[in-house]
Image: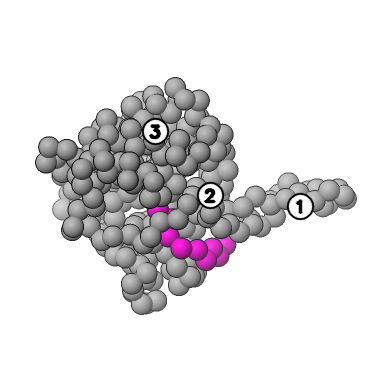
């Protein structure tokens, strides 16, 4: 497991200004403000441990060393050069969307996705209905990660509180800290619990209010923001990209159009796993 001591990685200011012009509004007052953003290109990285191919090369007396690939939090360790679409938080109005989205991803859209639901709500739904949303989503082939138990801002908590929040989240090997906020303490606790960190380098700003008093951005606005950010951050086809949307916004409805936009511009999208997934999310991802 790797230690990555970095600041939070969230959307760059240039895209936020352009996207806010569309929505005409900022982050809702009820939502905590994330830490100051940094450029996706400035994200530090650490080297992976030697791969089997590296060990084999040494065993055969190869003179040229094999360079270990870096683990990057903003791309969740993906090195495929594909686009990984992720979704987090919780679909409060229709909890079944947790597994319905998994079904559509693998059966209709033929893409691989990672879901990061807040476990406080998946547990509550299971207690009321007997349905395990996470287990069903994994059955349909979606990777499911940890987004903590109650979506608290981890960087404001004590070490013991951080440990409880992560331990109470969806059992997995990938952690998306709420608001993408993490520091040395969060990283250390997460690593000790067997987690790698996973944020994003494209924020579609789907959580922002839309025009005309709508609670969230429209599908068209979400698609525009993604296209704009890809160009703004010079994330061209062949780069590993992670898009972070939310279950409760219009992001799930926008996914078919996002797929069309990406493919029309030459981007390849992460492929679905072969069959059901488990709590272990591979490193690197088999995109």
* Number of residues whose C-alpha sits closer than 10 Å to that of mark 2, classed few (under 14), some (14–19) or many (20 or more): few
Decide: is 85 above or below 32.
Answer: above
Q: What element carries label 2?
A: helix
Residue highlighted by disc 1: 55
Q: Does the magenta stretch mainly form a helix, a strand or a loop?
A: loop
Decide: is 215 above or below 155.
Answer: above
* Number of residues whose C-alpha sits closer than 10 Å to that of mark 1, classed few (under 14), some (14–19) or many (20 or more): some
Compared across the picture, whether 154 is left or right of 209 comes to right
For the residues bearing labels 2 and 1, Cβ distance under 8 angstroms: no
Separation of residues labelled 3 and 2 (CA atoms): 18 Å
Quarter placement of the N terminus? bottom right
Residue highlighted by disc 3: 227
Task: Using the rendered image of the protein, determine whether residue 94 is visible from the camera's viewpoint.
Answer: no
Separation of residues labelled 2 and 1 (CA atoms): 30 Å
Quarter where residue 219 is shown: top left
First to last magenta residue range: 1-10
- Say which label, 3 or 2, has the lower sequence index: 2
For the residues bearing labels 3 and 2, Cβ distance under 8 angstroms: no
Residue highlighted by disc 2: 41
């Amino acid at each position: 497991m790797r230690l990555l001591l970095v600041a939070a990685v969230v959307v760059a200011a240039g895209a936020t200004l352009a996207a806010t012009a569309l929505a005409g509004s900022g982050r809702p007052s009820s939502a905590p403000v994330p830490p100051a953003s940094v450029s996706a290109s400035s994200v530090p990285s650490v080297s992976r441990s030697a791969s089997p191919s590296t060990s084999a090369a040494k065993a055969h007396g190869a003179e040229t060393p094999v360079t270990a690939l870096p683990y990057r939090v903003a791309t969740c360790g993906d090195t495929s050069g594909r686009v990984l679409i992720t979704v987090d938080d919780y679909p409060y109005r229709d909890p079944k969307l947790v597994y319905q989205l998994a079904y559509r991803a693998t059966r209709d859209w033929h893409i691989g996705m990672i879901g990061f639901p807040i476990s406080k709500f998946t547990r509550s739904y299971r207690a009321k209905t007997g349905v395990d949303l996470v287990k069903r989503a994994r059955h349909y082939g979606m990777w499911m990660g940890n987004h903590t138990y109650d979506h608290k801002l981890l960087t404001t908590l004590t070490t013991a509180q951080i440990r409880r929040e992560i331990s109470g989240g969806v059992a997995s090997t990938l952690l998306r800290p709420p608001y993408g906020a993490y520091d040395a303490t969060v990283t250390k606790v997460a690593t000790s619990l067997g987690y790698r960190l996973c944020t994003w380098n494209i924020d579609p700003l789907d959580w922002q209010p839309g025009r005309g008093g709508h609670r969230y951005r429209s599908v068209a606005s979400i698609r525009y923001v993604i296209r704009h950010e890809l160009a703004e951050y010079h994330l061209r086809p062949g780069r590993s990209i992670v898009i972070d949307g939310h279950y409760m916004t219009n992001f799930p409805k926008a996914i078919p159009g996002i797929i069309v936009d990406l493919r029309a511009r030459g981007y390849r999208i992460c492929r679905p796993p072969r069959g059901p997934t488990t709590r272990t999310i591979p490193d690197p991802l088999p995109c």
